Structure formats: C-alpha cells, structure tokens
Amino acid sequence: GLVEVQEEVKEEGVGHVAMRNLFSLETSSMETITVEKKSRKRHIRESADRLELSKKVSTRAEFRKKQNSDNLTHPPEFIVRPRGQTVWEGKTVKLHCTVSGWPKPRIAWYKNNVVIDEKAHPDKYTAESNYNMHSLEIKSCDFLDTAQYRVSALNIKGESSSVATVVIKNGFCSEHGVTFETAIIDSFEVAFGREGETLSLGCTVIVYPTVKRYQPDVLWYRDGKALSESKWVHTHWSGEKATLTLVHLNKEDEGLYTLRVNTKSGFQSYSAYVFVRDEEVELEGVPVAPLDVRCHDANKDYVVVTWKQPAVEGSSSILGYFIDRCEVGHHHWAQCNDTPVKYARFPVTGLIEGRSYTFRVRAINRAGVSRPSRASDPVTAIDPHDRISPLLGVVPGEPTDLVVTEATKNYVVLAWSPPAQRGHEGVVYLVEKCVAGSECWQRANTGMPVKSPRFALFDLAEGKSYSFRVRCCNSAGMSEASSATGDITVGDMLDLPAAPGPAVATRNTDTSVVVSWGASKDVKHLVGYYINYTVAGSDVWTPANNKPVKGTRFVCHGLNTGESCVFRVKAVNAAGYSHSSLESEAVVVKAGIAIPGVPSGVHLMEAARDYMVLAWREPVVTGGADIRGYFVDYRTVKGGVGGQWHELNPKAVTCTSYKAENLKENLFYQFQVRAINMAGVSEASLPSAALECKEWTIAKPGAPHDLHVLEVRDSSLVLLWEPPTFDGRTPVNGFYVDIKQAVAGEDWKGVHEKATKLKYMKVNGLIAGRSYVFRVRAQNLAGVGKTSAVLGPVLALTMPGTHEIILDVDDDGVISMIFECSEMAEGSEFIWSKNYKTLTDTSRLTIVTEGGKSRAIFNAPSLEDLGIFSCEVTNTVGVSASYTLTEAGESLSHFATQMAMELLEKGRVRFWTQVEKFTTGCHVDYVFNDAIVENGEKYQMNFDKNSGIIEMFMDSLAVTDEGTFTFNLVDGKAKGSTSLVLIGEGKATPHLVKSTEHGIVLYSLITYHMEDLQVGWLHKEAKIAHSDRVQCGVTGEQLWLKVNEPTEKDKGKYTINICDGKDGVKRFCDLSGQGEEPTHTHTHTHTHREMYRNKLIEEGDRARVVGGLPDVVTIQEGKSLNLTGNVWGDPAPEVTWMKNDRELVSDERYALKFEHGKFASITIAAVTTTDSGKYALLVKNKYGTEAGEFTVSVYIPEEEKKKE
C-alpha cells in the first residue's frame, strides 16, 4: 500500500509540474509580446523626433553654406534634356536642353562621341547658348546625320551629359519589290579652270538592277544649291554617264560641286571642289574683275546693284568701281556713275519704266581699269506697289514711313511708303533736304522726277548732317510733307571688317593644305574671306580662292609638293577689305598624318582547346604613317548574343596575327581589331564570325598570312608572306602563289608550277596600269591547305620619282649600294634587308644615312655577300627597291651599258661596252671561250678611261669564232664581267641568247622589218604556241622568242622561219641547258645587240636614222641636254622617242620636235640623275623601222658630293 501511494503522489507531482510549466510559458509569452508593442510605438515616436531634428540641422547647415560664396558651386544638372527626333531628309533638326550649374557650365555637342566643330562647318551646324538654354541646329539633314548626339556640360565641380538619337528618313521606298543599288565610279577630281574656258565634269553612274524605261533623277549642285540649265550651265545624262559642262567659266562658278543620283531606294552623291583662276589681265598691275553682280529692290526708275570685291587688287589698292548698264536686246553699255564708288553697293536711277536691264561692274586702281564682271541677270523697272487702279482727281495723301536705308560718304538712300490715295495718272515725289540747325528746306530732285518710293541723293557734303522729307503730287494737287527724318550724318554707316584671327596651316595631302583662322569680330554684313599664300622667302602672294568663303576653314588645293608655304586671310564686306590676319607658320606641302583606317577580314588561323590564332588584313588607308601595331578585343557569344568587349593585348602586336590564349573549350568567341600609328588608334574592325574554341584535327596546313608587296613596278612586284601558324600533321614544305586581274570574270592562275620554299617571290609579266590580286597556299605531305586572305587589288605602276639601288665603287675601290628617296616623311627610316630579312649583323655592311640617301658599304666583299639586298623606306607609300648579287667570289658588276656587237664596213666586227664608275687602276681581261686573248693581228683592244668605253675589234668572223666573248673587269676589290654568246652553223647568220631575270631570250636582227613579213618559231621541229610563259614578237629590227622560267623540257633545237612571200630564210639554235638557270635571281649577264644583217627585202626608201646621235652622252646634273637626229625615209617616217623602252611624250619635262621631215630633236631642261638611262629614236614608214640608240649618263659634281 505504501508503494502505491508513493507512485500516485509521484504521478501527481509530475502532472502538476507540467501544468505549472505550461502556464508559466504562456504568461512569459504574453509579457514579451506586450513589451514588444510598447517598444515599437516608442521607436516610431523617437524616429519622428530624430527626423525633425535632422531637418533642422540640415537647414541650419545649408544656411551656413550660403553665407560662404565658395560653397555656392555645384555640378551641372540637366533641367530639360534633349529629345530624340525622326525627320525627313532635307529638313532641319534642332535639339534643345536647359542646364543649371555654378560656375556656368561649358557646353559641347558630340556626334557618335566625336566633338562637333560648328565653326568649321557653319553651313551644317549652328550652336547657341542663352541664359542656360542651349541648342544645336542641324541643317539640310541627310542619311549620314543619323546618329546619337550627346551634349556635355562641364564645370569645376563635375560633368554631366545627355544623349538624344536623331533618325533621318530618306523618303524613298522599294517599288514593286525592286531595291536599287547605285554606284558612282570614274568620278571627277578637284578641278582647276581659268576664266573664259569651258570645263566639263563627269561621272559614270551604275544603277542595279536595270529596269526597262526607268531612269534615276540626276541632279547637280554648287555649294548646296541646285543647278538648272542656262546659258552658262549645260547638263547631260546618257543613261550611264552624267556630265556637267560650264561654258565660259567665271569666278562665280567656283565652289563645291555635287552630283546626286536619286532612285526609288535612296540616293548616292559625290562632291569635289572646282577652282577658277583669273584670266590674264591685259595691262599689268590692274585689278581683276569683280564678281557676283546682283540686283535688288527694283522699282519704276531705280534699282540697287551689289557685287563682291575680287581676290586680287593688283599692284595698288582698288580706288573704286564703275557700274555699267545695258538694256536687254541691245549691245551698248552705258556707264552709270562718273566717280568711282568705293562701296560694293550702288543705287542706279534714271531707268525707264517697263524696260529690262543687265548690269556689270569694273574695278579701278592706279594702274588702270579691270575687265568687266559677268553681267547680272536681267531685271525689269516696275514699281511693285503700283498695282491698284488709282482714283480720278484725288489729291494724294502724304507719304509715310520715311527712313534712311543707306548712308555712305558718296550718297544717301531714302525709302518711304506711297500714300493711300493717288490720282488717276499716278504720282510723282518731291524730295526735300535741310541742313541740321537751319529751317531752310531745299528741293533735292529739281531736274529728275521721282516715280518710285526710293531715291538716292548724291553731292552731299561729307561730315555734315541733314534731315529729309518727301511730298507727292499729281494733277489734282500736292500733298502735305511727310514727317522729317532725324539728322543724318553723311558718311559710311558700315565699317570695314576687323582682321581675322591668326591663320593656322596644317598638312592635308601632297598638293593641298588646310587653313583655319579666327572669325572677324563684330563684323556686319560679312561677304566672306579670301585666303592668300606665298612660298616661304618670297614676297609674291597668290590667291587660294577667287570666290569668298563664309566659314573659318578652307582647303587650299593646287599647291606644289615639297614647297614651304605661308598663308594669310582677309575679310571682306560691302565697305571693303579688312587688314590681313597674322601670317601662319610655314608648312611643307605634303600628306598629313592621320589615324589609320579600319583593319578587315578577321578570321581564324588555328584553334586548340584553350587558344585560337587569329589573322586579319591591314588597313587600306594607313593615314600617311606606318602601322605600328594592332590591338585585339574579344567577347563571348551565348545563344547568338554577344557579351561585353574586353582587351586581349595591352601591348600592340606588330604583325597581322595574334594568339589568343587562356580561352575556354567549346565556347564561342568574337574578335575585333584596331590599328595604331603615330597619330592614334583607329576604329574597331567589323567583328569576326562567332568562332568555337575547339582543337583542330586537320591533316593539311592552315592558311599563310600577313601578305604584302614591295618594289611595285610597271611589270613586276615582290610578294611576301608569313607561313601558316598551323602546319597540319606534317611540316609545311612549300608554297604556291596565285594571281588574277582585279576584274570580273577572271580566273585564278598559278604564278609557278613547282612549290617554292621561300617566303617571297618576284612576280613578273604584269601589265602596266592594271590591278591584280594575290593569294598564297601552303602544302605539306598531306596536300595543299587553305588559301590565304586575298591581297589587293595592287596597281602595277612605277610611281613617278622611283629610284633603284645603285652599285657604286669609289676611287679606293670601296663597294657600296646607294638608295635615294625623294618622298621622305616625318619619321621615315631606311630599312635594309638581305633576302627580305632585316639586316641585324653589322659586320658585313656599314649603313650610312644622310637625309634622303642611304648607303650600304661592304666591309669585306666575299661569297657571303651574295644574295638579294633590298631597302624599304618607312612612312611612305611603298618606296622600296632591291639589288641582286650573283657573281662568283667578289664579283660585283658595275657596267653602265650592255655588251654589244656591231658589224662595220668590209666585215669588220666591234665588241663594246661601257663602265659607269672606275678608278685609274682599273684594267680589263679579254676572254674568248675561257682563254685570255691578247692584242694582235686577229684582235685589237682599246679601253678609253675618259669615256669608260671598252672595245675589241676583229677583221672578220669565222666558224671557229662560235662561242662566248667576255670582258673581265678588275678594279681594286671590285670585279665584274659581261659576256656575249655567238651560236651559229657554218657561215649562216648567228643567233644571240641572253639570260634575264625572267628566263632566256633568243633573237636575231634583220636589216629591216615589213608588216607582211611572216615569222615562225619551232621547238624540236614542232610549232611553238604562244602562252604567258612562252612569247614571241618583233621589236624594231629584232625578232625574238622569250621563255620565262625555263625547265628541262625547254632544252633542244629551236628554229626560226622567215618569209616575205617570195623567198625564205631558216636559222637554227641548239640550247643544251648548260649554265645558270635564272629563276628568282637577277643575273648580271647583260643583253646584247646583234647587228648581223640578213638582207631579206630590198633596201628601198625605208625609214632610217642616218646620223647626228652619239652612242653615249655624259652630262653634269643641272645642265640642259639637246640632241638632234637626222632621219630619212620616203614616205616621211613617223618619229617616236623612247626611254628605257617606254615612249616619251612632249610635256614640260621633254620638248620633242620633228622638223622638215628630216630633223628629230629632244631637249631636256636641267637634267637630273633620274634622266639617266637608255634612249632611242625610233623611225618607221611602210618599208620598215629603225632605231637609233644612245645612253645618257648624268653625274653629280664632286663639290656637291663633299657638301652631302
């Protein structure tokens, strides 16, 4: 029982404790909740109290700040932001904004983040700022004005900006689903004409697709104003060619001409400036003609004539102007003023109502009167107010609104409003004047009735003050006088403009300079500015423009490259010219340096798991300076959406490829490239396609890259490239070069059959004036890989002033190579290379550079120096040249002319050549078939050291004389040789074989060549087909066969068949293939001129050069060269002068004459070293042709050498 009782007590105790704990927990929870509610309320009240206290503290702090002026400043803030707009093309857009800030913010407008210079383009932009309200006006909007425009406000406290988008809609739409594309080609360049001449401008317009009976709208503009057909302007559209013809040019025709082609899908336009020079004055010192004569405010008997002052005042300042008038339909010009007027505005009175007049203006100075200006457009003398039928017998009322519209020291012009009431026959006006301070009114028009509400008073005393009034009268009576004007002092109301700000000249192109200046201050009725220039050191100023320009920036064209010019500017208004601005600093006329263009063609060269190799094409426009490097940016692409761009290389890479590392496998990336030169960084290229970072497993090699050209000439160039970064499964073992002309429809052709292991190739056989594109492919054992990016188009043309590397030997026998450049730019350097690798080893060569000439001196010539030496000039347009050394040992050729052979009288033979430079210790070894021959009965030798001519004579030729004749020249350390090969059969006329850089040439010369002469070439008794590699032809008296890049297949017997229709001659030549194979090196085995005569047709009266021309002409630089050749032929021959196988034309450099059908002369004034070369006088008639050849060598005096 005791145990049970204890258990019950225990259970009760446990239950009691549990209940007690439960109630205790609920009570505690209630208490906690009650406390939280009280704390939240108190917290709210306390927060409100703190907020009120904070406001009081802030207000007190702001009040204290206002007491200190330094604390009033605050950053800019936009109150009203500019809003984006969409407008039609041709409309005007105005962007507005309101900005606050202290100090007053400085406002700048930007277009696509490029600052807008409204002063440089006043015809396009106008920016205004008034009372914190700012605006930008964009005039005559076109599609190119579509952009983001940003306005930036800046002060010392900070910067704020706002952006607005402007969209220009062209108003064109596709019609019937056709979208037209327009291209303007063969466009006109900056043109120069002279007054009185006729000038035509033209462009070829291509509209694609061609739709029958649809023609675009072709419009011409001058300075933004549309031109229409007139006496002076003719336009023509042929369907392909748009032509504008300006008849009888005047200075009014000077300006910016624009051709605009409108189609249903849009428009294309092209612009260029036309300059009009003044016509030669008849009397030296007189001014040139004024321009832009116009008529204003025409009435019954009165008109105001205005004009613009000319750019050239002559030998003295302009004293004034005479105004002439001519009635339309008549040819008599009457002078309107007896005394010259200085003001470029004149009221002409005394006109007859209802008649039409034209006006012209002449300027006068102390030397005389200028030619008259172009006549104004016709104007008719009619009162614009006289349109209401008058009332009969009514006394007119008084005139009203009398004002003085113009007041000069020569005249005063009054204007008023006619009375409301007029008589039946109209009214006349009586003008009265009164000297200030008196009450005496005098009639001013006693001898001239005034019918128009305008009147000009002359013969007033300068400096005196007058008041004026007007009455009107008719047959019914006279009106009361009008209200008098205030006192008017006779004198010019318009002041001369202030001088413009200093002129600043900056380089632009090789023939133009950009001139900018500060606008004239407080000038009224500005007509424009004239820009003059002079060559530094000269006092002769030449106008750059003959029509005033309104802006403060002008491009002066037509300057001479390399001259140092100084510029100045003067303003002009109706009152006259301002003083000239401060002269600019002298600037050399040459192409300026600008930011380069955009790289292109970003593509993938190689890919792996964590890197990709990229390549791209260099910019077409380098900005006048060498590209110093490239920056590459990348971004990831997910789901076709690109991320943010990031920079890959903080330091620019110098080649056109880059290895992007630390990429993630299987992700897609895009890349863009920017170029940098000394002027800055270009815009980014177009992004590449999305490229996946994934390892390549291709067996064939990737594409070569970094293609570029050097030594561009009329018929050849050197192409260089870098091997692919991805070799494939096996290493690259060769390259193939492909070429095609840059015209539609051309196919790619291989330059060579066998792969080359070199990373450069000289491409020959180009046609001068044509453009070509190139590509390169690499091969390995698996095959030929991808083609490189296409390089080009490249124009095959030898640029004017091009120099070649010259081998020189001085009196001490020191051998050197010399290269000159006449187009040195700022920062240009000479870079010498061997086998197209930059020279780094100075132990073999010493480079000495002075100005535009660089000399590479051989320290110790040896076999190690054989190879191709090239020199490139940086910061130029591809100025480069090369020279190939191929002779054995220390042999370095320096022959001036080719070794030649001539047949003399009685079968005597002469071998000869000429040495360009040599020392007194120079001697010659005469060699026949590797054996030295001596002076004796068979051979007679002579070396004339005055002229440098080496000769060897033989009495006759025999079969045993077949072989190789060689002149070996030894001059100190220098050696050289030239050879001639005779191949023949028995006593038949031998052939000549010459080795060139392209291959081999076989030829034979005949007495003369007729057009109907038949010539055939055979190889191994099979007729030779003409191709790009094997060519044949006739040059003068030479029949030749050229084999480019000869192979083993080209060995064997060659035959030439010659037939004139009756008789025939056959000659043979066997090529064994022995000797040097000329592939890519330039040999110095010189060409030879064979003078063996094959009499194929009778002599007749064929064209001949019978004398007068020397073999060699040596002349000092700066002297004048005049040569006359005596020619013969019946009929009289056609005469052509040639230099280095290129035809010469008569111009400022060469004066070519052919007189009396017998004497042909050439004159070169002030020869230079560039005039050295081979010349020929080529004569031709129907019986044949003949060439008289000679060599011109121009040397520099020793004194000048020492100065250099």
Image (cartoon, rainbow, N blue to C red):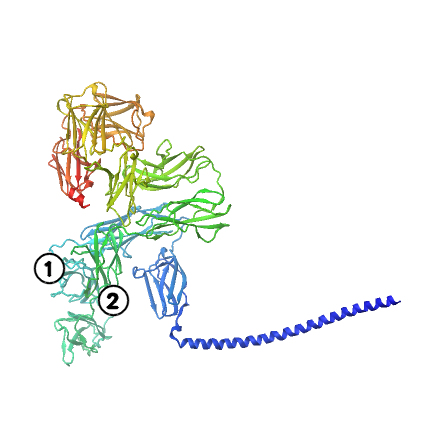
Q: Quadrant of residue 1109?
A: top left
Q: Earlier in the sequence, mark 1 or mark 2?
A: 1
Q: Residue at x 25, y 66 (%)?
A: 521
Q: Quadrant of residue 122?
A: bottom left
Name the residue tied to disc 1: 368
Q: Residue at x 59, y 76 (%)?
A: 42
Q: Is residue 473 visible?
A: no
Question: Which mark is drawn over residue 526?
Answer: none
Residue 185, horizontal then vertical, whole percent:
31, 46
Tell whether 526 sits left or right of 775: left
Q: Nearer the viewer, residue 1158 or 131?
A: 131
Three-letter amino acid code at disc 2?
Answer: Lys
For the residue labelled by badge 2, is the local secondary structure a helix, a strand or a loop?
loop
Q: Residue at x 35, y 32 (%)?
A: 752
Q: Quadrant of residue 991?
A: top left
Q: Would you call the spot at circle 2 few (<14 residues within 10 Å), some (14-19), or many (20 or more)? A: few
Three-letter amino acid code at disc 1?
Answer: Gly
Q: Quadrant of the C terminus?
A: top left
Q: Nearer the viewer, mark 1 or mark 2?
A: 2
Residue 263, horizontal then vertical, whole percent:
35, 51
Residue 322, horizontal then vertical, whole percent:
14, 63
Residue 430, horizontal then vertical, whole percent:
16, 74
Q: Nearer the viewer, residue 56 or 983?
A: 56
Question: Which mark is drawn over residue 521?
Answer: 2
Q: Nearer the viewer, residue 90 or 701?
A: 701
Tell whether 354 sits left or right of 710: left
